[in-house]
Image (cartoon, rainbow, N blue to C red):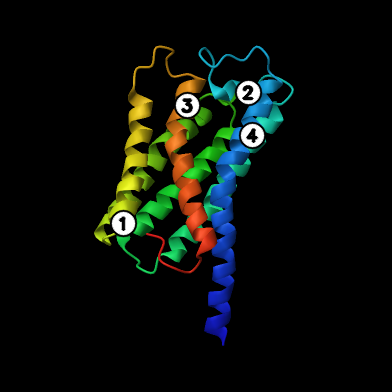
Amino acid sequence: MKTGSLTSRWAVYERMAGLCGVVSPFLGLILIAVSIYYHPSFSWTQNYLSLLGVEGPARALFNASLITSGVLYIVFAIGFGHSIPTRRLLVRLGTLSLVLGACALSAIGIFTRTTGTPHDCASVAFFCLMPVALFLIGAAQLASSKLASGLFTLTCGVLMVVLQLIPWPWGGTAISQLLAGLPLSVWLVVFGARLFMAPNRVKL
């Protein structure tokens, strides 16, 4: 009875985690858009997104969006990791990287760019840990013969790295940051939807 109850509770949590995965990218983008609306002088090609966290009337909203998105990512990562029956080392490491990357995202909102080194370290950690997480999870998916899922996940990871390294004519500004995070957002929505619709089943 206790086992069945625990399984049922995890199924509910996994559905909630899936919803967090779907909602978090859209919530973040909406709040960023609102922050930009209240910062008319913000330039996509000359400023970093982090400028929105220290200037303008919506700076608190922008920082809150990063912190909230990080928390939602963590909820998703735990549910996603638990939904996978196999306890392969790659899955565990991938889930851990997701959680740490999510913590880094929240840290970006906590330590604004005026803090200097803490903010820079959090930003670098986020853009490094998330691709690593996708590579590990993608490798685990391929090892479990989930070819389509594995290739999709690895492609998202590769795109995150490539989009960070491309020498854009406008430099590493807001557009570059948004583009680099887009593959992760797509991945979160896809697997968040799967987790929400079919909890307590194989999500690899």
Mark 2, mark 4: which one is toward the viewer? 4
**Dot 2, crowdedness within 10 Å: few (<14), some or many (≥20)?**
many
Task: Look at mark 3 in the image and give the residue it sits on.
Answer: 177
Task: Look at mark 2 in the image and give the residue it sits on.
Answer: 52
Mark 3, mark 1: which one is toward the viewer? 1
**142, 5: nearer the viewer:** 142
Give the mark nearest the N terminus, 2 or 4: 4
Where disc 4 sits, the SS reads helix
Marks 2 and 3 close (CB-CB < 8 Å):
no
Marks 3 and 4 close (CB-CB < 8 Å):
no
Task: Look at mark 1 in the image and give the residue it sits on.
Answer: 141
The residue located at (52%, 44%) in the rendering is: 103
Mark 2, mark 3: which one is toward the viewer? 3
Where disc 2 sits, the SS reads helix
Task: Measure the alpha-carbon separation of dots 3 and 4.
Answer: 16 Å
Q: Quadrant of the C terminus?
A: bottom left
Task: Look at mark 4 in the image and give the residue it sits on.
Answer: 30
Q: Position of residue 159 (x, y in %)?
A: 35, 34
Whether 108 is drawn above or below 89: the answer is above
Task: Measure the alpha-carbon separation of dots 2 and 4.
Answer: 14 Å
Whether 49 is drawn above or below 160: the answer is above
**Dot 3, crowdedness within 10 Å: few (<14), some or many (≥20)?**
some
